[in-house]
Image: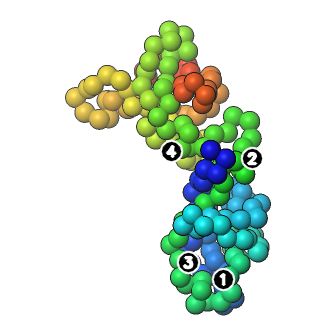
Amino acid sequence: MDNELIETGRIVNTHGMHGELRVQPWADSPELLTGFDHFYIEGAPVKVMSAKVHKSCVIIALEGVADIDAAIKMKNKIVSVKKNDIKLGENKYFIADLIGLRVIDAESFEDIGIISDVLTYPANNIYVIKRNSIGSNNSENEILVPAVSEYILETNLLDGYVKLRVIEGM
């Protein structure tokens, strides 16, 4: 899957009169979007002429988008990149790769459930784990676990699981 695309942001507005676009990044840091030669818009590659961080957004100039009229047509389009072009740091994962992983107790090796969502916060991400057991309401079927090394002992994408240190009250 060398050509697999991953969504990295949305064009939220124009910027100036010369075709620049304001992109809301969907990444840990807006700087991630400044290092690509090409973005993919609706699956088609578009050459990046420039990209710079401005406040919490990224201002980009794309080949073929040279004026305000062309820029307006790009509003609300999704910006993607090739997944293999993103260099993740150690113990960093794409949220899409975490969703659906089995969560197992590191001590007993029992299945706890699956990661159903990842909530992103400045301090750390939170894994929403849907328990295997069926309770009387949805809130009893989910637990929230900070994605920190104190609780997440191993993440194995290849075998599809996360080992969790279970503490009292989980």
Q: Who is closer to the viewer here, 163 or 167?
A: 163
Residue under circle 1? 65
Counting residues from the N terminus, which is met first, the one under dot 4 or under dot 1?
1
Identify the image quadrant of the N terminus. top right
Which quarter of the figure has residue 140?
A: top left
What's the residue at 75%, 61% (across, down)?
Answer: 36
Counting residues from the N terminus, which is met first, the one under dot 2 or under dot 4?
2
Q: CA distance from mark 1 to mark 3?
A: 9 Å
Q: CA distance from mark 3 to mark 2?
A: 27 Å
Whether label 4 touches label 3, CB < 8 Å: no
Q: Which mark is residue 74?
A: 3
Inspect the image, locate mark 4, and give the three-letter code of the amino acid beneath it: Leu
Counting residues from the N terminus, which is met first, the one under dot 3 or under dot 2?
3
The local crowd at label 2, few if under 14, some if 14 to 19, many if 20 or more residues have their Cα within 10 Å, is few
Give the image location of residue 110, x and y in percent.
45, 13
Give the image location of residue 49, x and y in percent.
76, 74
Inspect the image, locate mark 1, and give the three-letter code of the amino acid beneath it: Val
Give the image location of residue 26, x and y in percent.
59, 57
The local crowd at label 1, few if under 14, some if 14 to 19, many if 20 or more residues have their Cα within 10 Å, is some
What's the residue at 68%, 87% (across, down)?
Answer: 66
Residue under circle 2? 87
Whether label 1 touches label 3, CB < 8 Å: yes
